Amino acid sequence: MSTHNHEHHISTAGQLWAVGTALLILTIITVVVAKFIAIPPPLDVVAAISIALVKAFLVAAFFMNLYWDVKFNAMLLVMAVIFFLLMISITLLDTMYRNDVVPSF
Amino acid sequence: MANHSTSHPTHVHHHFVDSDQQFDTAKLGMWVFLVNEILFFGGLFCAYIIYRAWYPELFQMAALELNTFWGAVNTVVLIGSSLTVAMAIRSAQKNQMKGLKINLLITIGLALVFMVIKGFEYTHKFELGIFPGEYYTYEGLDHPKAAIFFSIYYMLTGVHALHVIIGIGLIYWIYLRAKKGEFSSEYYTPVEITGLYWHLVDLIWIFLFPLLYLIE
């Protein structure tokens, strides 16, 4: 990874404020969608998670600088998410298809 | 690399080729740690998902005990602190040491606001008898598994709050080093890396807020 000899990317103050403002607006949207627009389940969860994913993308790409960073670091984040999804899916394959839920659970 | 004593800036350790390689290596190390953090919180989110799939009605009822207003305020506070950390890194990159210190102090201030609000939320629940697990004594929720929601709530928000406290310590440490004049546009690796940690704390909260406070 030492082959590139680039200047570190410096975001302008305007860019950082734009990302911060976008995160603020998305926060307002997520509250409004949850509290004032009655989306039937399970679509309400889908909406909430989708907005959270957009916010997470903004933070990771532009605050954590992954957009301009060496791609290996972005790959690490993607792998973490993939393994997280793997952990959930395998666990749910068990818990959602049990004949009897363990009583004390 | 035979004659490396003359070409190396003082902050570069001798086992690195140059400042850039040292910077990238440190950042890679931090990202590996963040992967570990994501999977650590992932286990808790997994518990959340399983119990929400088993008892969806419990999560709808119990979320009403959480105060959406203060949760939203804390979301805004953390987003603001992420912005000031990004601004602190930008200041370091541009060699503006005063801006670096001011932005770090604002970040600490916002993190303290977050903790104070969280403290009030916890105290309010303790007064109602909403404790985790077997210590749960609240009568206002008619569900046999009511304690489980709050066990998950306290684990997720408690571990997150622990990260905020550690973050406050780290950012204060960076502030002290900035005050001693250890950083410049040539060397600001610890600022960058602590910033990455702080953004992750913000990232986790971005998911916690809708998943805990915004269930209708």
Image: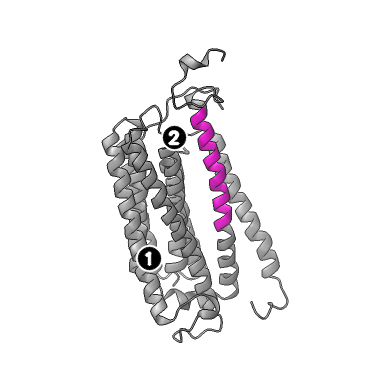
Q: Is residue B104 left or right of residue B196?
A: left
Q: Is residue A21 left or right of residue B49?
A: left
Q: How far apart are marks 2 and 1 (CA)?
A: 31 Å
Residue at image location 48% in from the left, 84% down from the top: B137
Residue B102: where, in percent of width, then height? 27, 43
Q: Is residue A37 left or right of residue B29?
A: left
Disc 1 marks which residue? Answer: B118
**In-front residue for pair A6/B184:** B184
**In-front residue for pair B99/A13:** B99
Marks 2 and 1 on same chain: yes
Chain letter for the residue marked with disc 2 in the picture: B
What label sits on residue A102 in the rendered view? none
Crowd around label 2: few <14 · some 14–19 · many ≥20 (10 Å): many
Mark 1: amino acid: Lys
Residue at image location 51% in from the left, 32% down from the top: B24
Q: Give the range drawn in magenta.
A: B22-41
Disc 2 marks which residue? Answer: B189
**In-front residue for pair B87/B112:** B112
